[in-house]
Amino acid sequence: MNSEEFAHNMESLRAHLDTFKTGVANATATGSCGGGMVQVTLNGYHRLLSVKIDPLVFETHDAAMLEELIVAAALDADDKVDALQQELKGPILRELHLEGV
């Protein structure tokens, strides 16, 4: 590989990295549980943005159940953020010939 090809490859990789950073910064994912009675939204950095709880959940007076629903919804959202990040990493990994990593 000559220096011109190397420079082109670095420019392409930089563009893919910028796309990844922008994608993660703008991404959100919402996980839910209990038929949507609890919803948790995370950003692309796995930071909690919001929790929404259907008022009907409070009628049961079952704190343990609510806690479990929140954790399950958060894990669902976390899995979705991971999937978004993997999708955004695809072009970078292909550029580096590291598919499947």
Image (cartoon, rainbow, N blue to C red):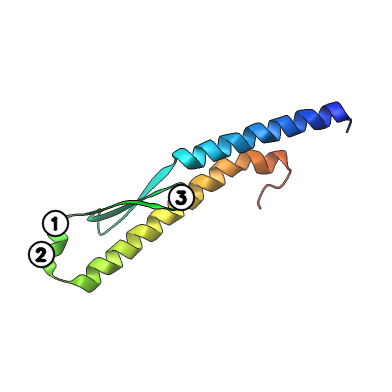
Q: What is the number of the mark on residue 59?
A: 2
Residue found at x 63% / y 35%: 16
Circle 3 is placed at which residue position? 81
For the image shown, how many numbered marks are present on the structure? 3
Q: Is residue 80 left or right of residue 71?
A: right
Q: Nearer the viewer, residue 87 or 40?
A: 40
Q: Amino acid at mark 1?
A: Pro
Tell me: residue 87, above or below residue 53.
above
Q: Amino acid at mark 3?
A: Val
Residue found at x 68% / y 47%: 99
Q: Position of residue 22 (x, y in %)?
A: 52, 36
Residue found at x 53% / y 46%: 85
Mark found first going from the N terminus, 2 or 3:
2
Rounded to the nearest angstrom, the CA distance separating label 2 from label 3 is 31 Å
Q: Are marks 1 and 2 in contact (CB under 8 Å)?
A: yes
Residue found at x 44% / y 50%: 80
Q: Residues within 10 Å of mark 1 (few under 14, many from 20)?
A: few
Circle 1 is placed at which residue position? 55
Q: Residues within 10 Å of mark 2 (few under 14, many from 20)?
A: few
Q: Position of residue 37 (x, y in %)?
A: 22, 56
